[in-house]
Image: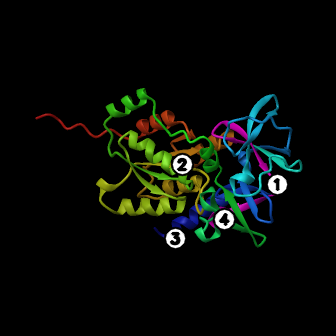
Amino acid sequence: MGGTLLEKVERHTRLAGHNRVAMLLFRLGDEQLFGINVFKVREVMRRPPLERMPGVHALLAGSCDYRGQTIPVIDLAAALGYAPLRDVESAHLMVTEFSRSMQGFLVADLQRMVQCEGDTLVAPPSALGFGTRVNAVTRVDGMLLAVVDVEHVLASIDAAPAELSEQMQRVAGARSLAPRRVLVADDSLIARRRLVSLFKQMDIECVVAKDGREALDRLQELAAGDPAEGVRLVVSDIEMPRLDGYALTRAIREAPNLHRLKVVLHSSLSGIFNEAMVKEVKADRFVAKFQPDLLAQAVLDLLPEPPQVPAD
């Protein structure tokens, strides 16, 4: 892959405000900075009164009333190995929306919003000790910023697998696809596992990439190799280190040997912002996480059927 293509893509994405993530910064009990994409945050406030829920997961601090709706409240400090905040009156609540559901996260204190360049976000070295609940790190004013993998935290509370309905399994089994291979790009380990499991149910093989840059490199390698080993469809997260899903889609559309690939953007982000950007970068479909049947139907719609062999 030539540097010229990436430079052109990154220049476009910077001008359009993409491959640049707006992060809300917060702390969980010490000086370490953590961050979350501001597009997932609905509101921030002082910790409201919490209703305790007996017999639930240890990370659930309770529930609260949010504008007339009861939402679960998750102790994010406890999830990241800090002292619990459920009884700390000075704690703050971040109300977030993931995959069209709302929940609150308790944090020690909120800091500020910053813009992070996508290519400065990298996977955290294991030596930092964050484990799998942080999926990227960068530097802000010289300080280490850890981006929380909220999908991993939510999955640890509700570990329901991504299962296709029986009807969709029958539909997928009846379809003949060519090829039965897709590329999956997602920086969340939990999301990658769910997608691989989902496509296994459809008898579809996955080529897996951990971020947009790795996905683009892998697509170029496959395009230069045996056509039988290639892919015709990409399922990509939007928020990823180094190259996000929008920038990846732009790169695919601008590469002469990749531009015919079908692209499904698959994200926990939702709303009008996503719909407009999907059109702008010329992705073929947007499917909110995690809706197995909707994603499976999108793949069936976009993957071609093999050509018919005329009978002798």
Few, some or many residues within 10 Å of mark 4 (<14, 14–19, 20+): many
Percent from the top left, x then y, of residue 161? 51, 40
Few, some or many residues within 10 Å of mark 3 (<14, 14–19, 20+): few
**Foreground label between 3 and 1:** 1
Q: Earlier in the sequence, mark 1 or mark 2?
A: 1
Residue 22 visible in the current orientation: yes
Residue at x 80%, y 66% (from the top left corner): 31
Where does label 3 land, which residue? 3
Where does label 2 land, which residue? 191
Residue 15 visible in the current orientation: no
Disc 1/disc 2 C-alpha distance (Å): 27 Å
Label 2: which secondary element? helix
The disc placed on residue 137 is 4
Label pair 3/4, CB-CB below 8 angstroms: no
The disc placed on residue 241 is none
Few, some or many residues within 10 Å of mark 1 (<14, 14–19, 20+): many
Which amino acid, by three-letter code, is at mark 3? Gly
Residue at x 49%, y 55% (from the top left corner): 252
Q: Earlier in the sequence, mark 3 or mark 1?
A: 3
For residue 251, above or below residue 232: below
Q: Nearer the viewer, residue 177 or 16?
A: 177
Per the rendered image, the range of residues in magenta is 96-120
